[in-house]
Image: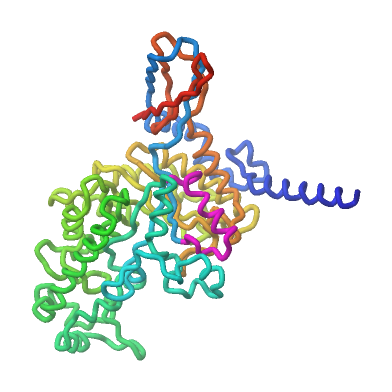
C-alpha cells in the first residue's frame, strides 16, 4: 500500500511539473501573476492580436476546392494538413552530440514533428579542416559513441559541426526540408580556415608580414585591425599588385568551395545561404565590381565576393535549388545590397533575416514594455526587406529565458508566441528558423538559456508555445460530408493535405491535395 501511494505521489508530482512547464499567459487576462507588464500587453493588445489573426487568415490561408467525383454524396471525408507550406525550422548542429542516446533521440524526434526544416552546418573552418579534406562522411569523432564519452564537448573542433552525410540522410528519410549554412562568409573565427594563408607564396608572405602590427606576441593576417597604415591607405588594386598570386588563389578557392559542395550534393539540399553577413562590406563600399581583391572588414577576401559567389552558385547548382543571402543588419542598406545584386544579374531566391536577442536582459526589458521587437518595429523592418520583392526567411532567431527560472521561462514563451504569430502573419515571410534548440548548446558567447529544451532535453514553456501554434492552431483538420458532384469547399492553411474516406464496402481510400 505504501509503495502504491509513493508511486501515485511521484506520478502526481511529475504531472504537476509537466503542467508547470506548459503554463504561461497567452494574454493579459491570463497574466494574473504579472509575468509581463501592463506596458507590454498594451503593445500586444487585443486589437493588435485581431490584426495578426486577420493577416494570418489573408496571407497564410487559401480557399480549397476538392473534387472527388467517384465519392457518393453524403460520404464522410477527413481532410487533414500533413505538410505545411510554411517553413518551421531549426538548426540541427547538435546531431548525436547531446551526451546520451535518450537525449539524442528526443532531439531527433523534433524534426518531422515540430520542425519541418533543418539548417545544416557547412562552416568552412570545421568542414574542410585541411585543403581537400571535406567532412562529408562520418568518422569516429562524429559518432554518438564519441560524444557520449567526450568530457569537454565544447572544446572539440567539430562541436556543433557534425559530418554532413548522416544529417542529410536523416533529414531525407524523415521528409525534412534541408538548408545549407553557409557557403561564403568573411568571419575568421567560425568560417575561413587558417590554411588559406598557405596559398600565399613566401615572397608575398614576407610583404604581408611587414604590413602587420604586432599585438602582444602575435600578429594575425586575418584581423583587419592588425594591418598597418600602409595597408589601410592602399587600394585593392594596389594590394593586388603586391599579392598577385594570393589574389588569384583566394578567388579560386572561394569558387572551388562552392563547386565542390554543389557537385557532391547536387540538388539534395533545398536551399543554401550562398553569402552570409556581407552587408557591412557593402555599406562601406568595399564590394567593388571588377576588383579581384576585397579589403573586407573581415580582412583580405576574394574581390566582389558576394556577386561572384552567386555567379558561381548559379552555374553549379540545379535550377530548383534556392539560393539565399543572409544578414543581421535588416536595414535599408541590406535591401539596397540585395537589389543591387539582382540588378547585376544574380539569382537570389530568398532573403535571410536574423533576429538574435543574445542578452537575456533584452527579454526582461521587453517584459517591462520597452520598445524592442514590437509589432510596429517588426513590420517596418520586414517592409524594408520585403521591398526587394523576394520571400523572407527569418533564418536565425534567439529568444532567451531571462533568469532561467519559472518566470524567466514564461517570459520566453510569451515573447516567442507573440513574435511567431506576428512573423507568421507577414505576407513575404516564408519561414522561421529557431537557432539553438537546446540550452547551453550555442556557440561560445551566445546566451546559454535560449533553448526550447533544457540541457537534459526537458521541454520549456516556449516549446509548448510553439508546439501549440504549429501543430494545433495552424493545422487545418476536419471531417465533413461530400456534397453533390463530390465537392468539398473549405478554407485552410496552405500545404499538402491527406483526404481519406471509406467506400460503401468499408474500404479506406486516401488522396493527396495541395492547397496553394
Q: Can residue 279 be seen in the rendering of this structure?
A: no
Q: Residue at x 15, y 71 (%)?
A: 293
Quadrant position of the C terminus in the picture: top left
Asked if 216 appears above or below 12 in the picture, the reply is below
212, above or below 368, in the image: below
Depicted 425 relative to depicted 479: above or below: below
**Residue numbers of the magenta segment:** 94-116
> In the rendered image, is residue 1 in sight?
yes
279 horizontally vs 242: left or right: right
Q: Tell me the residue at 27%/76% (across/down).
A: 224
Q: Which colour assignment does the render follow?
A: rainbow
Left-right relation of 401 to 282? right
102 inside magenta stretch: yes
User: Residue 510's spot in the image, x, y percent?
Assistant: 45, 26
Q: Which residue lies furthest to the bottom in this view?
A: 217
> Which of the pair 171/211 is nearer the observer?
171
Name the one closer to the observer, 327 or 258: 258
Amino acid at each position: 500500500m505504501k509503495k502504491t501511494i509513493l508511486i501515485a505521489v511521484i506520478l502526481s508530482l511529475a504531472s504537476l511539473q509537466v503542467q508547470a512547464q506548459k503554463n504561461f499567459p497567452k494574454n493579459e487576462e491570463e497574466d494574473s501573476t504579472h509575468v509581463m507588464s501592463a506596458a507590454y500587453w498594451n503593445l500586444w493588445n487585443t486589437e493588435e492580436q485581431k490584426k495578426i489573426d486577420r493577416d494570418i487568415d489573408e496571407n497564410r490561408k487559401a480557399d480549397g476546392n476538392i473534387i472527388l467525383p467517384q465519392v457518393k454524396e453524403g460520404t464522410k471525408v477527413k481532410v487533414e494538413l500533413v505538410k505545411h507550406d510554411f517553413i518551421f525550422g531549426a538548426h540541427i548542429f547538435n546531431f548525436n552530440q547531446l551526451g546520451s542516446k535518450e537525449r539524442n533521440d528526443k532531439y531527433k524526434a523534433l524534426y518531422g514533428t515540430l520542425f519541418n526544416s533543418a539548417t545544416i552546418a557547412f562552416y568552412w573552418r570545421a568542414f574542410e579542416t585541411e585543403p581537400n579534406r571535406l567532412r562529408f562522411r562520418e568518422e569516429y569523432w562524429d559518432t554518438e559513441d564519441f560524444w557520449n564519452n567526450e568530457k569537454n564537448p565544447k572544446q572539440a573542433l567539430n562541436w556543433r559541426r557534425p559530418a554532413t552525410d548522416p544529417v542529410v540522410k536523416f533529414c531525407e528519410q524523415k521528409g525534412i526540408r534541408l538548408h545549407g549554412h553557409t557557403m561564403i562568409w568573411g568571419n575568421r573565427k567560425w568560417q575561413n580556415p587558417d590554411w588559406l594563408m598557405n596559398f600565399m607564396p613566401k615572397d608575398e608572405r614576407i610583404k604581408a608580414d611587414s604590413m602587420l602590427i604586432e599585438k602582444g606576441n602575435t600578429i594575425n593576417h586575418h584581423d583587419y585591425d592588425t594591418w598597418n597604415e600602409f595597408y589601410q591607405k592602399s587600394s585593392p588594386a594596389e594590394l593586388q599588385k603586391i599579392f598577385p598570386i594570393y589574389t588569384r588563389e583566394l578567388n579560386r578557392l572561394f569558387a572551388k568551395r562552392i563547386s565542390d559542395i554543389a557537385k557532391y550534393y547536387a540538388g539534395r539540399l533545398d536551399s543554401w545561404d550562398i553569402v552570409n553577413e556581407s552587408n557591412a562590406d557593402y555599406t562601406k563600399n568595399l564590394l567593388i565590381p571588377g576588383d579581384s581583391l576585397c579589403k573586407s572588414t573581415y580582412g583580405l577576401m576574394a574581390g566582389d565576393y558576394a556577386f561572384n559567389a552567386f555567379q558561381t552558385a548559379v552555374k553549379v547548382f540545379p535550377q530548383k535549388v534556392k539560393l539565399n543571402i543572409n544578414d543581421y543588419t535588416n536595414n535599408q542598406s541590406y535591401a539596397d545590397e540585395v537589389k543591387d545584386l539582382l540588378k547585376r544579374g544574380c539569382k537570389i531566391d530568398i532573403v535571410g533575416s536574423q533576429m538574435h536577442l543574445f542578452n537575456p536582459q533584452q527579454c526582461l526589458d521587453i517584459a517591462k514594455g520597452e520598445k524592442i521587437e514590437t509589432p510596429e518595429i517588426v513590420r517596418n523592418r520586414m517592409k524594408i526587406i520585403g521591398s526587394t520583392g523576394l520571400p523572407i526567411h527569418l533564418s536565425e532567431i534567439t529568444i532567451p529565458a531571462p533568469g532561467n527560472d519559472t518566470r524567466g521561462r514564461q517570459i520566453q514563451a510569451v515573447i516567442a508566441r507573440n513574435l511567431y504569430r506576428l512573423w507568421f502573419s507577414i505576407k513575404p515571410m516564408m519561414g522561421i528558423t529557431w537557432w539553438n534548440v537546446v540550452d547551453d548548446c550555442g556557440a561560445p558567447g551566445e546566451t546559454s538559456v535560449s533553448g526550447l529544451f533544457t540541457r537534459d532535453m526537458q521541454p520549456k514553456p516556449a516549446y509548448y508555445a510553439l508546439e501549440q501554434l504549429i501543430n494545433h492552431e495552424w493545422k487545418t483538420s476536419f471531417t465533413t460530408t461530400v456534397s453533390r458532384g463530390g465537392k468539398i469547399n473549405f478554407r485552410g492553411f496552405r500545404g499538402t493535405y491527406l483526404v481519406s474516406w471509406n467506400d460503401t464496402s468499408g474500404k479506406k481510400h486516401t488522396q493527396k491535395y495541395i492547397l496553394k
